Image (tube, rainbow, N blue to C red):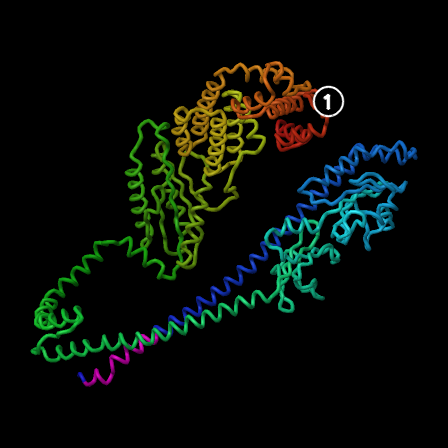
Amino acid sequence: MIALLVRQSLFRKILTSFMILIVIFALVDVAIFSLVKNRLHGERIEQNRLTLRHAADRYHSQFERVKNALYKQYTDKDVTRLNRLIISKTQKDSFKTGAIVEDIQVTVREPELYLDNMMLLFKPVPLLVDKKGATEEERLFPDIFTSETYSSTYWKAQFEREPNYVIHPAASFFNPAEHPEKKTLIPYSIKPPTASYLVVAMIDAERLRQAIAGERTNLNLTILEPDGRVLYRADTGGPVLPDGLLSALPAAGGGPDYTVLDGNYYFSQQDADGLQYILSVPGLSFAEEANRLNKLMLLVMAAAVIVSLVLSVLFSKRIHKPVRELLSSISNPGETALDSQIHEFDLIGHKIQTLLKEKDEILGELRQQQSVLNGYDYIAKLKNINHELSDWHSIPHHAETFTIVLYELRFRSAAFVDMPVNRELAAQSIGEHLKLVTDERFPGSYTFRMEAHQFLSVVPGNERDRLVAMLEELKPMLDRDRRHCLVTAAVSSWFGHSAQLGHAYKQVQEMARQARLLEEMQIVLECRTDPSVYALTLTQEQELNAALQAANAAEAVRLVGQWLDELDRDEASVRRFRLFASSVSAQAQKIVEHYKVEASTSWRLKPMIQQLGECCTLKEYRDTLQAFLNAVTVFIKEKKEASDPIVEHVLGVLQGHYAEDLSLEALAGSLNLTPAYVSTYIKEKTGVNFTDHLHDIRVRKARELLLETGMNIQEIAEQVGYRNISSFNRMFKNRTGQSPGEYRRTQTMARTS
């Protein structure tokens, strides 16, 4: 036997095992390295993608800011007045351009615009106004704005174009008198089709690029117009766009957002205005990093393999020697026990003789106890010891059809029942009864508890009709306890394989959530359209806020009751009612926090909020929300009754004189205080500044006039203190989410319906 074992060579097997492990770990290392390399490559791609996205967003935002500045300058009253004088052929001596020049200087100095200059050109006369002043354009262009691309003739031709805004391709400009070095500028002009004057903003392209690129000074970015022409290219020494790049780039919105040509990477992104941004990255940087990683991997792997081989040989020899000695001692029990330097082997050797002696005794005992073990196995199966675990794991192994039923229990709040019950005991009782009935009707079914308030039955076969019949019979019995607990039973579709259990459970969960607020057991057989989220509309939030801030409990209760009735008419689900109650309570808590109600006081709302989550009927929601809103308004009223003479005076003036031209300076003067102090004081005491208080009162009065009178919007705006209809529209929409006309129309339609 020993000779046979020696021929099989334990040493070789151990060494071979080590070799296999070395190969496996080497392959794992290669796989990990490949993943890491791919990950690094992906991160480089993502880094450049994010860089391009950031640059594109910044350029787009910058062009929008310049566009706004152009529009502001174009519509400036001084500019339009000068244009009228020019059109009326007034003498040049009467042209006043000082204010316009100051406006241009202020605009050009704005750091976020990155402008080098801004100029106005007029079609009827050869007049040009820029940050230096007014001059004749024939002198300006050769003397100040020298460019091979843009001449006076080019700008005159712009008066015949159709687009309002045009971003012109970047070009080099220089001022021979002041700065002989060239500057790369991007002209951006505004000229409506019928206009007789043109406003041009000169964007400093290099300064803008440095601001956007930041520390990445080698950002090689090219901006293309929608027709493919180059609008601007940052000359940082990167690869030039090759021919055919545009056709190779992916279409906007589809495929990857980069391509590789001639070993270089080109990333592309298009903004909302159709401008295409292309980031050029030399492919050499990617290749160098990959080569460096390859060399490092080969070096580390070679060292690891060599060390592993040496250690494998040493460990194999060390393990093989005591094993041979152990085999010898087993073959010759009478020999002396193994004396090894390894403590474990030495202990094994000393115990082998004892184990061999005990072997016969143990085998005898096992033969005698075999029948006892078999009996215990039968008892375990008959008594279903740990049967839920074993049964449940047996279900997925049977490829059979099934239908499941989910029972969801909704226990009513203790505030709405005469005698509260132990929910755990009640749930156990209901679950046992459901299991008993289901097992009796459907042998082979499996009923168990999923959650504290959920039971699930898995019924083999397509037994949906029989299940519905069983539930109809269970309904009268379960409805007897509806004063304490309401049950919803959701029956799934028929499924053809047990692998679909997860999907079936999700289906019945969704169906159970669609139960209605009914005081009876509900059997849900199909899904219906029901939104999974709910939130108060902006108008509802504002109406509820107004009622709560006024401490008007009756109005708040009326509004919430009206919205509850709407949900009831829509046959809303239990989930929607809970989401609605959560939205109302969250909005009320915001108001409570706004008025800085003490935590010890607002803590009394917690039981009512918890009770809202346990409401099971419309009446319970109505009563709980009424009590909740009454408590909230009491807190707010108590907080507001803590009088403050300055706040009362300011709010009284706003309420009585909101239609007048009020100012913080005049109001502060009447109190012999500084405007800054009054503004800060009002903000600290009420949480809202003076201007917002004034606009809130005006908009609230305007809403009343829109609904209660037939006055037009202009008249209403003037009556509540707005002399500018645009300001009125903006403030009204900012606070209601609708324009005045839309608000009147929607509220009128709502009242009619």
Residue 321 appears at what percent x and percent y? 20, 78
Image quadrant assignment for residue 113: top right
Q: Could you tell me which residue is drawn at 57 percent across and 20 percent down?
A: 678
Q: Residues within 10 Å of mark 1 (few under 14, many from 20)?
A: some
Residue 679 appears at what percent x and percent y? 58, 23
Residue 194 in sight from this viewpoint = no
Q: Is residue 402 magenta?
A: no
Amino acid, disc 1: Glu
Task: State whether residue 258 is above or below residue 531.
Answer: below
Q: Nearer the viewer, residue 238 or 319?
A: 238
Q: Which quadrant: the N terminus? A: bottom left
Residue 16 in the figure: left or right of residue 728 = left
Q: Could you tell me which residue is drawn at 78 percent across and 47 percent down?
A: 178
Q: Which quadrant: the C terminus? A: top right
Image quadrant assignment for residue 697: top right
Residue 73 appears at what percent x and percent y? 76, 37
Magenta-highlighted residues:
3-20
Image quadrant assignment for residue 223: bottom right
Q: Which residue is mark 1?
A: 715
Q: Could you tell me which residue is drawn at 43 percent across and 50 percent down?
A: 506
Residue 414 in sight from this viewpoint = yes
Q: Nearer the viewer, residue 196 or 285?
A: 285
Residue 70 in the figure: left or right of residue 11 = right
Q: Does the magenta stretch mainly form a helix, a strand or a loop?
A: helix
Residue 676 in the figure: left or right of residue 502 = right
Q: Secondary structure at mark 1?
A: helix
Residue 626 appears at what percent x and percent y? 46, 24
Task: State whether residue 184 is above or below residue 430.
Answer: below
